[in-house]
Image (cartoon, rainbow, N blue to C red):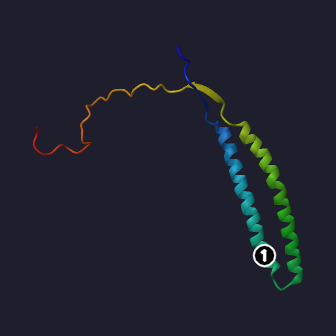
């Protein structure tokens, strides 16, 4: 007798695992929007006529971007490890057999849903 073919599958994530995965995705979105928002906000002041306001806006923008560029990789590592740790467990299940499908309860009618027309043989 031959051994059954086994398939390796993963269980679904737990509720906590799904929350962690969404937090990971939303964190990346927040970091991207924070960087783009900082550039958009500071850009209007940096190009203004007052040099002191332009300098202050430039320093604020540089500090904010430095903070965001530091937090993004650190948060990615922490949340990425949590996402990997909350995956579903691996399971081995037997592969479905190649047996024919079960018989239909209603007889098969040729022609699909269109009734036959014309003279009957």
Front residue of 42/8: it is 8
Q: What residue sits 87% from the left and 65% below the top?
A: 63
Residue at the farthest bottom position: 49
User: Label 1 crowding class (10 Å Cα cut-off): few <14, some 14-19, many 20+?
Assistant: some
Residue 79 point in image, percent of width and height: 76, 45
Quadrant assignment for the C terminus = top left
From what the image shows, is residue 23 above or below residue 106? below
Identify which residue is drawn at 80% across, 81% down.
47
Tell which of 71 and 97 is nearer to you: 97
Secondary structure of the residue carrying tag 1 is helix
Image position of 35 with respect to 16: above or below: below
Instruction: Please report the residue visible at 39 percent of the width from the left and 28 percent of the height from the top.
Output: 101
Q: How many marks?
A: 1
Q: Is residue 74 above or below residue 40?
A: above
Residue at 86% over, 62% down: 66
Find residue 110 and report its image quarter.
Answer: top left
Q: Is residue 103 left or right of residue 60?
A: left
Residue located beneath label 1 in the image: 43
Q: Position of residue 73 (x, y in %)?
A: 81, 52
């Amino acid at each position: 007798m031959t051994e059954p073919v086994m398939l390796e599958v993963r269980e679904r994530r737990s509720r906590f695992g799904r929350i962690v995965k969404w937090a990971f995705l939303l964190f990346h979105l927040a970091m991207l929007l924070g960087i783009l928002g900082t550039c958009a906000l500071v850009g209007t002041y940096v190009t203004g006529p007052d040099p002191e306001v332009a300098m202050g806006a430039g320093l604020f923008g540089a500090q904010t971007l430095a903070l965001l560029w530091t937090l993004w990789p650190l948060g990615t590592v922490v949340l990425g490890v949590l996402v990997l740790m909350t995956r579903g467990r691996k399971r081995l299940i037997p592969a479905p057999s190649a047996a024919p499908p079960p018989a239909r309860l209603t007889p098969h009618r040729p022609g699909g849903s269109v009734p036959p027309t014309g003279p009957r043989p």
